[in-house]
Image (tube, rainbow, N blue to C red):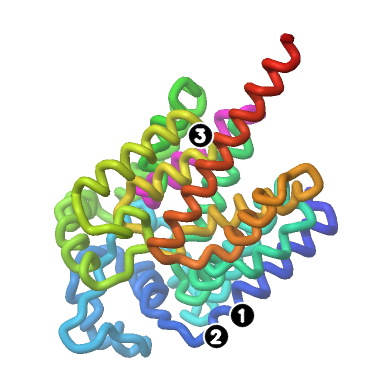
Amino acid sequence: MLDRTRLAYAVFAFALGAAMTYAPASHLDFNLFWYLGGHPGSAYDLEVVRRPDFVGLGATTGPGGFLPFGYPPTLLLLLAPLHLLPIQAAKMLWSGGWCAAFAVTASRDTRWATPLLALSLPLLWCSAIGQTGVMIATLVVAGFQRLDERPRLAGVLLGIAACLKPQALLLAPIVLWGRWPVVRAAVLAAAAAALASLVFGPQLWPQWLLGIPRFTAIVGPTFLKVSPPYLLDGAAWRVVIGAIGLGFAWRERNLTGLLVGNLLCTPYVQAYDLAGFSFLGARSVADARRASAFEVVLGVILIVCAAWPVLTTLYCAGLIGLSLGRSWTARREAKAQTT
């Protein structure tokens, strides 16, 4: 049961997400989602955006443009019900519903700071264009909140997130190493979702796998990358930054380790994928009485989470520095107690 405060957060977040439907932003991504909900067999056909019935939705890619669907067929399970509604109503329900779910999930840790998530640029942008970032953040945060108390439920949530957007949990095997009940539940949930997606036709899985290089070739030069690997040009930088991400994920083995490690290791990250960092920021602000000034300031910055390679690099550096500082303080206090 939700208490009144969390219910109020949910209503406010739903209204915010639904209102973002009318923001001056392209609805092309969601138009594709809605269209494929009724035409799943066309998910990996680049020509689908040139069909008259798609063009009639009112958002096109422009002359010669493509809009590839890079998600695995499992996402189609969530998109199919959207096509039962008019496209505008479907988008309001999609964006508003996931904003509400994110707010309720986050409020368990962010408490009084939850309304500050309305300032999250990733959340606002994701809601405006109807993308999946808030949905994935909700599933991942909810999973990590339950790692100890309900490991099997945590595994189900993380497994579903992984089969909807695999790159979002790229380092999950490292972070979850040793938590075998969680891992087993995640694998079973992902396998069940994959089997369920066969209702759309088994041919979609090979089409998706074969289409990944094509997807990368199209979106690579087209869309802004916000992840630290794109701060500097060169393989050496990407190897170094990736190694730091792997090391940090192994060291932390928690949500911060996953989010920072993924951001340092994954080349293709969009602004709407960073809602999880806004959650980390609001969680720090909620603990302002016990936190240091650095933690509070970093928390406020992370809530907003403006996305650009130089900024995301600074976010990661701040979170890594904070983790190292806490470890140093804990060791110093432990040493003082033994002397």
Q: Is residue 139 left or right of residue 145?
A: left
- Label 2, label 3: how far apart the Cα atoms are: 36 Å
Question: Which residue is located at x 24 percent, y 87 percent?
Answer: 62
Identify the residue position indicated by label 1 in the image. 19
Name the quarter where the C terminus is drawn. Answer: top right
User: Residue visible at 72% across and 10% down?
Assistant: 338
- In the displayed structure, would residue 145 be above or below residue 205? above
| Magenta residue span | 148-167
Residue 242 versus residue 99 in the image, above or below:
above
The picture quadrant where one finds residue 225 is bottom left
Of the pair 56 and 174, the residue shown nearer to us: 174
Give neighbour class at mark 2: few <14, some 14-19, many 20+ (Cα, 10 Å).
some
Residue 312 appears in the figure? yes
Position in image of residue 91 (x %, y %):
51, 75
Q: Nearer the viewer, residue 276 or 324?
A: 324
Judging by the rendered image, the residue that carries numbered circle 2 is 22
Q: Are marks 3 and 1 in contact (CB under 8 Å)?
A: no
First along the sequence among labels 2 and 3: 2
* Residue 166 visible to an observer of this rendering: no
In the image, what residue type sits under mark 2?
Answer: Tyr
Residue lying furthest right in this view?
4
Q: Amino acid at mark 1?
A: Ala
Q: Which residue in the structure is indicated by mark 3?
A: 155
Check the image and name the residue furthest to the top: 339
Residue 160 counted in the magenta span? yes
Q: Position of residue 248 (x, y in %)?
A: 44, 35
The answer to whether residue 227 is left or right of residue 303 is left
Nearer to me, 164 or 217: 217
Is the stretch drawn in magenta largely helix, strand or loop? Answer: helix
Does residue 284 appear left or right of residue 302 in this picture?
right
